[in-house]
Image (cartoon, rainbow, N blue to C red):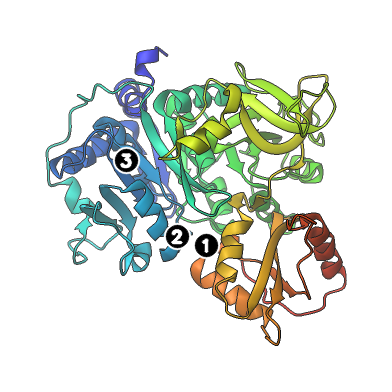
Amino acid sequence: MEEKDKRIEKVFAEAAYDSPDVTHLLLAGQGTRVSYAETYYRARCLAGALQKRGVGPGDRVASFLYNAREVYELYIACGLLGAITVAVNTHSKSRELQKLFADCEPRALICSNLYLDRMIGNVLPASVQVRVVTHLPENTGVAGWLNYDLLMQSAPCMHPVNQGRPQDPAVMIYSSGTTGEPKGILLSHQALIDNALLASQALGLNRSDRSLTLLPMFSSFGFAFDFLQMGLLRASVVILPTFSETDALDAIERYQVTFLAGVPVMFARLFAPDFIEARRLDSLRLMDVGGGPVSPRLKSDLKKTLGATVCESYGMTEISPVASVQSLNDDPESSSCGPPLPGFDVKVVDSEGKPVPRGEPGELLFKSPTFMLGYWNKPEQTAEALAGGWLHSGDYGYWDEKGNIHILDRTKDMIVTNGFNVYPKEVESLIMELESVQSVAVVGIKDEIRGEQVFAFVELRPGQHLDPSDVIHYCDQHLARFKVPREVVVIPEIPLTASGKIQRFKLRELALQQQKEPGQKHMELVDA
């Protein structure tokens, strides 16, 4: 692929030209088949309608959609316009959205009607001049919002005249920073495409493969696997609107899905032996698991149960996003997540930043041709993350003699649960809003199914009382469900170091003890 063609809209323009009748999307539950030619045509119509309303190069267009054909159309349309798609996590609540939109100042927003209730009040800044809602009944509308389907018919389809560069920003994906403030990660067309090409080659994907969207399309891995890699290959994607075990298994059987990418908790639930009894899943040939700590037992169980090849990948959004893929010939019970992709350099350093020998643990640093462009409006944080030309992963691991990467633990306080990142300070800041709370600390503890779970310790003001269930309820009102602590324990005081820093390692020990000998009751949450 020539360098000049490494833009998202060009990938799909070429697909519409050389594979017009090839099935691109299969809409599970609807029985609808969408060709590559139709996807590109609809994307051009959307681009024309947005251009007519003032959206142009450099503008941000926010996507508040789960998995749907409209997501694919929007990514391509923004490429045609030279605009930047801002992929927003649909678990976000109004308070989180208000911060995010104030930061990126989108000119347009495409929102599912399922989430319109979160846009009430002053959530949207004045910058959002074009407001579009999807999935409305035919010929209906919402005051102040444009109907997506009617919008598509309101202007001539845009011709691909944008002369943007491959190095231009294509997508912005938000990840909360350690300060709890939203942090937009800018990724270029070229970095995303180069990474997708390298990762798909490492996985051995091909044109005859058919994937199922288990991962949300607002995540970097969902975008990479089910949007870009499949598009580059001219392969087919089965779109599952929301994840449920029954619907996913039905889709695998009906559409003969061959490839799945997902996080450990999805696979553990989806392929529980009792759950898949009497199912015909022999079409599956390859499964990629990542997005959080993966137990060798899970990989081994999946291999034995399904007979498919199971490999682990590792990465982060800042790398666009895949850094390594486990060899397809590797032992499925290996703790390795494979060698780095071609062109990537890896360095392991100690706490002072000095390199350590192969096989010895330390923080993993990466040098990659697919680095992010930076954090939106955060030059200092960008410089810090890419100091010396190396991306500091914050992950603790080692590089073995065979060149494989092994992840041992996380050096940062970030918690990864169900494949989503949770930063303790964001949760702590919210809990501190409760008047009876004196201090709070949030930690992650290992969980066989979720990877990690969020655990909160609360110290109360003198003479105050607080039911742990009230803390969970308050968090559930204001945070995405995956950020809400699954357990809250009130303790006499938060342990601190001499310098006043929280001793999180002591709290993790306390959390494990609490699980074995539960004291105060807590509210159980059902995963959303």
| Residue 362 lies in quadrant | top right
Residue occupied by mark 1: 480
Mark 1 Cα shell of 10 Å, populated few (<14), some (14-19), many (≥20): some
The kind of residue on which mark 3 rests is Glu
Query: Vertically, is 319 above or below 346?
Result: below
Q: Count the numbered circles shown.
A: 3
Q: Upstream in the sequence, badge 1 or badge 3?
A: 3
The span from disc 1 to disc 3 (Cα, nearest Å) is 26 Å
Q: Nearer the viewer, residue 352 or 329?
A: 352
Do residues under tags 2 and 1 come within 8 Å of each other at their CB atoms?
A: yes
Residue 470, image x and y in percent? 61, 80
Do residues under tags 2 and 3 come within 8 Å of each other at their CB atoms?
A: no
Q: Quadrant of the N terminus?
A: top left
Q: Quadrant of the C terminus?
A: bottom right
Residue occupied by mark 2: 96
Residue occupied by mark 3: 73
Residue 185, image x and y in percent? 47, 39
Mark 2 Cα shell of 10 Å, populated few (<14), some (14-19), many (≥20): some
The span from disc 2 to disc 1 (Cα, nearest Å) is 9 Å
